[in-house]
Amino acid sequence: MLQSPEELRELVEGYLEGLALTPALGSLATSMRYALAGGGKRIRPVLCLATGDAVGAAVEALLPAAAAVELVHTFSLVHDDLPALDDDAERRGRASTWAEHGEATAILAGDALLGEAVRLALGYPTTAVAQELVAATLGMIAGQQLDLEGAPDLERVNRLKTGALFEASVMCGLHAAEVPTGEQAPWRQFAVELGALFQLVDDLLDGDGAVLRVGEEATRRLADDAADRARERLAAIPAETSVLEGVVSDLAARTA
Amino acid sequence: MLQSPEELRELVEGYLEGLALTPALGSLATSMRYALAGGGKRIRPVLCLATGDAVGAAVEALLPAAAAVELVHTFSLVHDDLPALDDDAERRGRASTWAEHGEATAILAGDALLGEAVRLALGYPTTAVAQELVAATLGMIAGQQLDLEGAPDLERVNRLKTGALFEASVMCGLHAAEVPTGEQAPWRQFAVELGALFQLVDDLLDGDGAVLRVGEEATRRLADDAADRARERLAAIPAETSVLEGVVSDLAARTA
């Protein structure tokens, strides 16, 4: 039976709370858990679970992959917030990890979050989950570097910074669910549209990015187009995609 | 036919020079290659290759694993040198990566080096190479955090900071060579002694660590004991270990 995004989000929260980190990490675990508990919406791991759920996999078997995606996301936030990068002392209404635990610890906590993410992804018999995750991680890092250099092609920057991990969220769900490679292509197309939708709505909420380039109305239209294409992609996939359709609508309508 | 450490080192250098990085990384590759070309002795990848060579594997098949180990080592140096951590503006006689390319780029270059290392390790059909590498990486990070906090148990700190990757160098060579798990235990014991030997000689060369605790003479004795035990471990392993015996002697006698 398909689970709702809210149910899936609770499963993610529970799994992250109970997640056993490498014992040797000792006190570093405190800052890693601080970063992980930042109250994000868990969109990516929910997407991973909903994808696997849609193709009939047991959600419990998908949780390590979903958590791995969230750990990579958290790693990137911890490092991006550093003074040398975006210099953000706040994130989601509280002190960012470096502001709370110091720069040195934040650098190491980010490194360790990435390491733990890969460790989780390596719990599957196939290397495909970890491969997908690492490719997305390298894409994200590349996007951050392009951003740092003020690269003019913002669409490419966003595709890397945001889109790569959205794709990986869907694809890791498929790999964890052991969906054959030959059936995965339409799913990736769906994920690409979803990543674009997320970014466009982000731009609308922040009043930057696409809004500065083409204006608010045009950005809204682009977002709605991306949502339509995401729904079309889903409709063509022979799976129980009703919850994922809801995810598309939620992303299109989100206000935070 | 067994290859000498010098021959193996040349193979590593050639492989690292020709290594294809993820294309999207673009200009970040420059700082990654800068860090990688730092003129290190390549002890860890040579150890990885010599181990696989000793059990009869084709050295070419071991090169990705060996390079992965060196990339993890380089990632750790790039991050450890950062102003917030060890604040080293120099490494091996030239500007450290952050001093040359800026802090932001050095953080991202380190992240990307770790990502590429895992990508290389995932090129093997088994997840074991990547698992070994990631466990060692998490150990190293834990050791650096303990060091940062001034943990009193220096042996534990060194076992994590230095020993973990020495172990992984040997074990990744075995996994890449497809040596059955049941035959690996004596190899790990050998690697532990080798890591201890390396650290003790490091302390002798730097006049710190064990030298400050027990004096120079006693440290020399401890190093010689570790070398003896490493040789004993090797002697008990049914493989062509003559080159590895040479590696032990080189590590015991090294002056830089």
Image: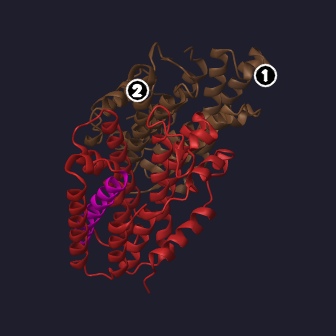
Chain colours: A brown, B red
In the image shown, does A84 or A118 lie closer to the viewer?
A84
Residue type indicated by callout 2: Ala
Please tell me how crowded label 1 is: few (under 14), some (14-19), or many (20+) other residues with Cα within 10 Å.
few
- The percent position of residue A211, horizontal first and vertical second, equals 73, 18
Q: Is residue A85 in the magenta section?
A: no
Which residue is label 2 attached to?
A: A35
Q: Residue at x 34, y 44 (%)?
A: A61
Q: State which quarter of the image contains the N terminus of chain A.
A: top left
In the image shown, does B152 or A146 lie closer to the viewer?
B152
Give the residue at the far bottom of this rendering: B1
Marks 1 and 2 share the same chain = yes
In the image shown, does A91 or A4 lie closer to the viewer?
A91
| Mark found first going from the N terminus, 1 or 2 | 2
- The percent position of residue B254, horizontal first and vertical second, equals 38, 65
User: Disc 1 and disc 2: Cα gap in Å?
Assistant: 33 Å
Q: Which residues are magenta?
A: B182-206
Establish if B177 lies above or below A172.
below
Can residue B162 be seen from the camera position used here? yes
Magenta highlight: main SS: helix
Find numbered disc 1 in the image and state the secondary structure of the residue it sits on: helix
Q: Nearer the viewer, mark 1 or mark 2?
A: 2
Please tell me how crowded label 2 is: few (under 14), some (14-19), or many (20+) other residues with Cα within 10 Å.
many
Q: State which quarter of the image contains the C terminus of chain A.
A: top right
Q: Residue at x 36, y 56 (%)?
A: B205
Q: Is residue B200 in the magenta section?
A: yes
Which residue is label 1 attached to?
A: A213
User: Which chain letter matches label 1?
Assistant: A
Establish if B176 lies above or below B110.
below
Q: Residue at x 40, y 63 (%)?
A: B255
Left or right, A218 with respect to A49, comes to right
